[in-house]
Image (cartoon, coloured by chain):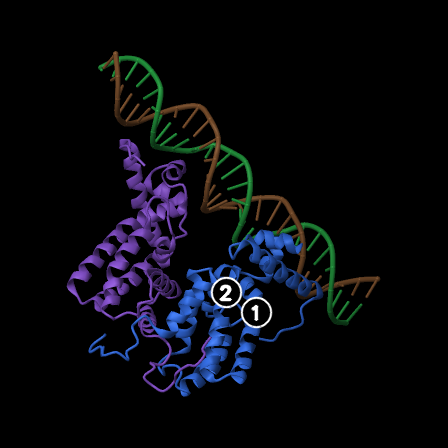
Chain colours: A blue, B purple, C brown, D green
Amino acid sequence: MQTRPMRADARRNHDLLVAAAMAVIAEKGPDASLNEIARRAGVGPGTLYRHFPTRDALLAAVFQGRLTRLCAQAEELAEAMPPGEALVAWLRLLITHAMTDHGLGARMMLATSSAGVDCWAMLRGAAERLLHPAQRAGSVRADVEFVDLVELTAGIAQVTADPGRAERLLTLTLDGLRRPRDTTEQTAATG
Amino acid sequence: MQTRPMRADARRNHDLLVAAAMAVIAEKGPDASLNEIARRAGVGPGTLYRHFPTRDALLAAVFQGRLTRLCAQAEELAEAMPPGEALVAWLRLLITHAMTDHGLGARMMLATSSAGVDCWAMLRGAAERLLHPAQRAGSVRADVEFVDLVELTAGIAQVTADPGRAERLLTLTLDGLRRPRDTTEQTAATG
DNA sequence: TATAATACGGAGAGTCTCTCCGTTTCAACT
DNA sequence: AGTTGAAACGGAGAGACTCTCCGTATTATA
């Protein structure tokens, strides 16, 4: 996979397209017309399709920047707080990310490999950087895995656009719906 | 809201359209062409739009039957099991429903009022019929509300198509990600 | 500057949604 | 049964979108 330097005009159009896509998607949602994005970028539709063969490829390019920042924040949190709190704080950031642009963030998070950018791998690195210490510290149950975190977070982000509701659902997910079992309930067979 | 009897041909076409929609959506997903549904039903596009002004109205009609059955099952479970178990069993059914037709079920569950069929009200009745007893019995925390159940369930259904994963995420949501607090961790300030 | 490789642009084919209106069908009344 | 007004039908068509193809223009290299 050797990346030979792009021709100057190609590079310029690539950047114009990503910028236009960011603007149009922010205002019209993830189903915005690709035609309009091309128009806004000042290029023809053909050019758009040459750079980004599928809609998802374009979306991935738009989100790569945000995702990179999100993963960097995981590292910062890990160094600034105790493991359990750091994880929770990052999950909050993750939900915010997943809610951007009408739930588009969540859609990208779930895409295993969206043409070039491997969101999955990036997220996995960041999430496990926080999850494993939190588990070692005993703040999070040991059987929780990376994929659980991402799917639950993405799910919450997709069902509501209201940050207050999202916060509420995240809290519930962290603590569980069942009553805390410091009572007598022993749950003989829950399977 | 007086419902005068439909004309015979109107009634017939209505039913043909719902049947066609069910078939086409099952095979092509929720974004299936409305044109094709009309064609399959043997009517013109105009007729389809007269009966169902929006896509969601048609989808709601398709799902009304399934939803009705789901709500009836809530009643049956309530009579057959202890409150806590009944709720969990019904949530399992709810997720299955939410996953049908490529996550379309979840989309309908979240639609507050989809042209005629008020899914929200139906679900609310069924869910609270199970939730409140479960809370009185102490199986579920008292601050959980109907809307929490629906949103969490719909979220799970939308992020995965694999029943195994859905089951896993439901279990996690019921029990929480945090470690059960029979340990020493007291969480002074988690905000 | 000449030339091959690369990228561009936009016309156009095919599809989809949704509307409009002339035509047909139904049901109520004589 | 026959008449008639209302209700419903159907399909042509406007407008928008996705994606392709290929003649033209631009870029890098010699």
Q: Do the residues labelled 2 and 1 touch (CB within 8 Å)?
A: yes
Q: Where is residue A70 in the image (x, y as percent from the top left)?
A: 54, 73
Task: Tell me where residue A16 sits by quadrant.
Answer: bottom right
- Residue extending farthest left: B80
The residue nearer to you, when weighing A31 against A93, is A93
Left or right, residue A78 beside residue B141 = right
How packed mark 1 is, by other alpha carbons closer than 10 Å (few <14, some 14-19, many 20 or more), is few
Q: Which amino acid does the dot numbered 2 rest on?
A: Gly
Q: Which subunit holds the residue at mark 1?
A: A
Q: Which amino acid does the dot numbered 1 rest on?
A: Arg
Q: Where is residue A146 in the image (x, y as percent from the top left)?
A: 42, 77
Mark 1 falls on what kind of element? helix
The residue nearer to you, when weighing A112 against B180, is B180
The residue nearer to you, when weighing B159 against A93, is A93
Q: Which subunit holds the residue at mark 2?
A: A
In the figure, B52 relative to A178: above or below?
above
Q: Position of residue A12 (x, y in %)?
A: 69, 63
Left or right, residue A54 beside residue B32 = right
Residue position for label 1: A66
Q: What's the residue at 24%, 66% (across, down)?
A: B136
Q: Can residue B23 be seen in this view?
A: no
Q: Is residue A182 visible?
A: yes
Marks 2/1: CA–CA distance: 9 Å
In the figure, B99 relative to B171: above or below?
above
Quadrant of the drawing holding the N terminus of chain B: top left
Task: Tell me where residue A145 sits by quadrant.
Answer: bottom left
Residue position for label 2: A105
